[in-house]
Amino acid sequence: MVSNENIELDKNDHHLKQLEDIYGLEVIPIGLPHISKIMSIRPSPVSCELVVDKDAVLSFSESSISSSKSYVLRLSISELVRITCNDSELRDKYNIEDYLPLSKRDIDYSILFDNVRGLVLRSKINPNISKSLKEEPSKFFLYNNGVTIVADDIVADPINANKKEQEGPFSIIKRIKI
């Protein structure tokens, strides 16, 4: 029984029970909260941790009275692969030294949901991005204008005698949710 009301019908309502008994039905009340839940395609946030040198972080805000801030990070391609892989345990291993396990993982494509540039599936550019990643990874950002990560919150904690910062919630500077 589908309704466009904010409150779903009570399954134990005597009228619904009567319908079930008379017609041999099972009544499942569905309202807007349930419809909204099943219609939402937004994936759950992906979280990860990063450790970056302090001089690898540049902050920017458009106005001194604005609460929004942007950060530009210098990040190795192996770190980018790690924080976007489909293995949540690897995403949290910011001190990984052997990157071989990353070669056996796929990218978690749900992180592209909020892609600020928009994903174009049949693009002539995508194969070139992949090619530069495979053949010239050190020039990936030079050729491809970097990667934008959107976060609700970023928490930075100094570590290693304030030489490095550990990324936090979102996905940049301690625990990040992408």
Image (tube, helix red, strand yellow):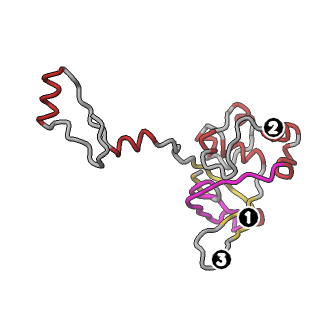
Relative to 14, 124 lies left or right: right
Q: Secondary structure at mark 3?
A: loop
Residue under the image location 81 percent in, 37 percent down: 124
Considering depth in this image, is 132 or 96 the residue closer to the camera? 132
Give the x, y percent position of residue 35.
Answer: 38, 41
Q: Which residue is mark 3?
A: 63
Task: Check the image and report above or below for 148 versus 71.
Answer: above
Check if mark 1's residue and mark 2's residue have beta carbons within 8 Å: no
Q: Secondary structure at mark 1?
A: strand
Answer few, some or many: residues within 10 Å of disc 2's Cα (few below 14, many 20 plus, some between 14 and 19).
few
Q: Which residue is mark 1?
A: 57
Considering depth in this image, is 88 or 128 the residue closer to the camera? 128
Between the residue at mark 3 and the residue at mark 1, the CA separation in whole angstroms equals 19 Å
Between the residue at mark 1 and the residue at mark 2, the CA separation in whole angstroms equals 32 Å
Foreground mark, 3 or 2?
Answer: 2
Give the x, y percent position of residue 53.
Answer: 75, 61
Relative to 61, 14 lies left or right: left
